Amino acid sequence: MDDSDEEYLSGITPSSRFSSIVPESPRSKEGVSTRTRARKSGTTDDNLKGNNGGYSWEDEYQRSWDIVKDDDQQGSFESMVQQIIENRKKKIMKNPATPFQRGIIRTLVIVIDGSNSMAEKDLRPTRLTLSLNYCIDFIIEFFDQNPISQLGIVLMRNGVAHLVSEVSGSPQYHIDKLRQLKIRQHNKFEPSGDASLQNALEMARALLKFNFGTTSNNTKNSKEVLMIYGSLFTSDPGDIHKTIQSLVKDEIKVSIIGLSAQVAICQEIVNRTNHEPKLSRSKHYGVILNESHFKELLMDFVTPLALTEKEKQEEASLNNGVPIIKMGFPSKVQPIVTSTIGNTDFTVEFPQLNASFPTQGSDESKDVVEVNTNTTLLSSTTIGYQCPQCKSRVTNLPTICPVCGLMLILSTHLARSYHHLIPLAPYKEVPIAESYDSEYCYGCQLKFPRGVKPGTHPGVLESMTSSRYRCFKCTNDFCINCDVFVHETLHNCPGCENN
Amino acid sequence: MEAISDRLFNEHTTDNLQDDPSLLTIILDVSPSGWFKIQNVISIQDVVKSLIVYLNSHLSLNNSNQVAFLITSPLKSKFLYPKLDNSNIIKDSVSKDMYRQFKIVDDIILEELNQFLNEMIDKIENNKRSTLTGAISLGLTYTNRMLTLDQSILTTTASAMTTTSLANSNQNSSNITSSSSTSMKSRMLIISANDDDDELTYIPLMNCIFAAQKMKVSIDVAKLGFKNSSYLQQASDATNGIYLHIENPKGLIQVLSTAFFIEPNLRPFIILPANSNVNYRASCFITGKAVDIGYVCSVCLCIMSKLPEKCPACNSEFDKKIIEQLNRVPQIRKKRKLESNGNGNNENNNN
């Protein structure tokens, strides 16, 4: 409905609505072409233009080896080193130091295109193989950063959606499924047919209804779909706009990575589900330039999404507060190797109850069933976790205790996201001076360079730094390596921890 | 043909046997309260004696093996070895009775330890939290330098040169963690007699654990004293290290040179003393006490042992209905007929 409205408007009054945004764009009578032109001149054109005003493809090709100048001056090389250091620095600064609300408990469905277009070899070896490889990397990284999140995988093939793996919190399960798919990609699951956006999205919507294994949807989790789309069209059984409507209603956010070119319907899905203005460029829809760009786009989805303004307002207006969840932190029960030889009294091994159900009633969950009736005799060879409330044992975490219904989780799972919650303040560079207080890096004990008197090395001084980065809480100085390590990996300031 | 393939095969196997150097970081917790409690069993002096034998045996395994020694107290944490300005000691460390590296390490550690303990006696205050996490952080930054940089580099300007080349190679291989200029292994041993778990800062310790996991540094723990420390248990369990509660520390040197002496990559092949059950308790954000069952804010995931109206970390208000539900005392119902069993289960879930 919205579409036809807009075409109608722009046809009748050509300069009323868009004229303020794009005054110079020539307007044609046909609605469709107006729309595309408006978008092009409004947003995309500026992005395509390079520094000197021309399009990037009109520029002379810049070879990476030309950047390093082949002259004998020490200065150019030194400034290049400096520049690379600065770039690393900027990378840290991208992580904001102010905490903001993110949807930490995520449920994500990855939709992979398995249609004809994925057999193309513009990505080596094929689009599908590369996508599967990157997805495996993505899953590992995703569960590292979002340990209590869940994930499912759907494949689009022959106009229908196939379920690759059910929504589950176990990374190994998904990786195994993707590996199986990879092995059989040339005989059973070779790319074929068309892709159907509607079928895939409807299946993803059905999968996302699950919430930590329960169908009750009382916790505010973020529900997301990440689609890797190689086709340029979709063949749907019904009206895709209805599907989009229901996605919006269910608060499912769709992100798409295009492998060939921008597709209008993808843009619409992304904009509608992410509550972004129509015809705007969204960071949730990216079209890849090359392999490394593909990986970059994919890895961007690892960090939890920040809540949008609209959601925050909704939450405030509803005024019924955020839900609070009761959780149990089970203790790990180690396998004890016992010998039963010569002691007939204890040869009877009680089967252990595997109480976790990560696959929700599929065949896998029926494999491992052992029951332990005697808690003092733990002669199991598998690692188990004991529910602190009812003392029943489960083998997989996180899960819901099948006996007492308590959500069981490892405290290390929760703690992984704490650095989003309590970010470490960035270090500040110490200004250049003749002499400094600190002689060694506080973290790794490296020796700092001494201060340089101004004027002794003309020309070089501009590119020199003090190489010291100071934490302003504990006033200790760190080298650039420690700075990067502390902010990207450790998330602790060693100096502040010692006070 | 056979001869050729045979030779190739042999070459391949010798390649696998390459002996990588390894870095051993020892963190000794000298918090006075813990050591006071076990004064009848063992003293710091005895422990340090055993540790020095342990360090020397590690150094003697491989010529390029490295050690680091950190000390932590409620006052502060500090590197004892490597010492920043060690030119004096290195000069007069030549002795005909002792391997030079042993003498350097032993002399520096003993001298610095004495100095540190004397300082601590003057400034000791009660009721200060442990700085063990600071020591682990320092150990990890030092490990990071040793793993990613050439060990011979001593100044930051030199390190900048190598890191840029490293960064370039990282971009090419697009695999940041696995590529490093030196193939060094690393592990960490914590010796603590501190019985009070609540003195440890929870979030920084968790951050340390994850950093160690990423760097593949195993954290081993030798716990003296009377109680198990559940946080240190979690640290060693998550990083694939060994946790041992040594109740009779007289034979400490034997434990050090057997269980703790094996490189992490060899551990799967050796039957080691089994970890006792690991208690994965979390820390309450309000009281700082360890909890088994807690309430978790769904926005920021902070853990609480009580039910407040507002989240202490992110300040968002909780749903009052849910709080009411959680506060409800479980009621024992009279037995009903079999039909209503399903309903009964659902209501239990909500409690």
Image (cartoon, coloured by chain):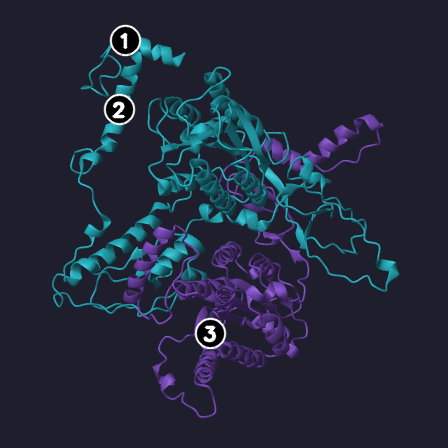
Chain colours: A cyan, B purple
Numbered mark located on residue A40 in the image: 2
Amino acid type, label 3: Asn
Neighbour tally class for label 2: few under 14, some 14-19, many 20 plus, Cα within 10 Å: some
Q: Which quadrant of the figure has residue B43? A: bottom right
Q: Is residue B71 left or right of residue A122?
A: right
Q: Residue B192, percent across and down?
A: 57, 69
Taking the image as shown, residue A64 lies to the left or right of residue A304, namely left
In this rendering, do the residues under marks 3 and 1 share a single chain? no
SS for dot 2: helix
Please tell me whether residue A77 is drawn above or below residue A56 in the rendered image: below
The picture quadrant where one finds residue B33 is bottom right
Mark 2 or mark 1, earlier in chain:
1
- CA separation, marks 2 and 3? 62 Å
Instruction: Identify residue type, mark 1.
Output: Gly
Secondary structure beneath label 3 = loop
**Relative image position of residue B35 (x, y in whole percent):** 59, 74
The amino acid type, in three-letter code, at marker 2 is Lys
Q: Quadrant of the C terminus of chain B?
A: top right
Q: Which mark is residue B44?
A: none
Is disc 3 surrounded by few (<14), some (14 to 19) or many (20+) residues within 10 Å? some
* Residue that extends furthest to the top in the rendered view of this protein: A12
| Residue A468 % position (x, y) | 29, 62
Most foreground residue, B317 or A460: A460
Residue A11 got which mark? 1
Q: Which chain is indicated by disc 2?
A: A
Q: Would you say the residues marked 2 and 1 are in contact, meaning their CB atoms lie under 8 Å apart?
A: no
Q: Secondary structure at mark 1?
A: helix
Residue matched to label 3:
B65
- Where residue A207 sits in the image (x, y, percent)? 57, 29
Q: Chain of mark 3?
A: B
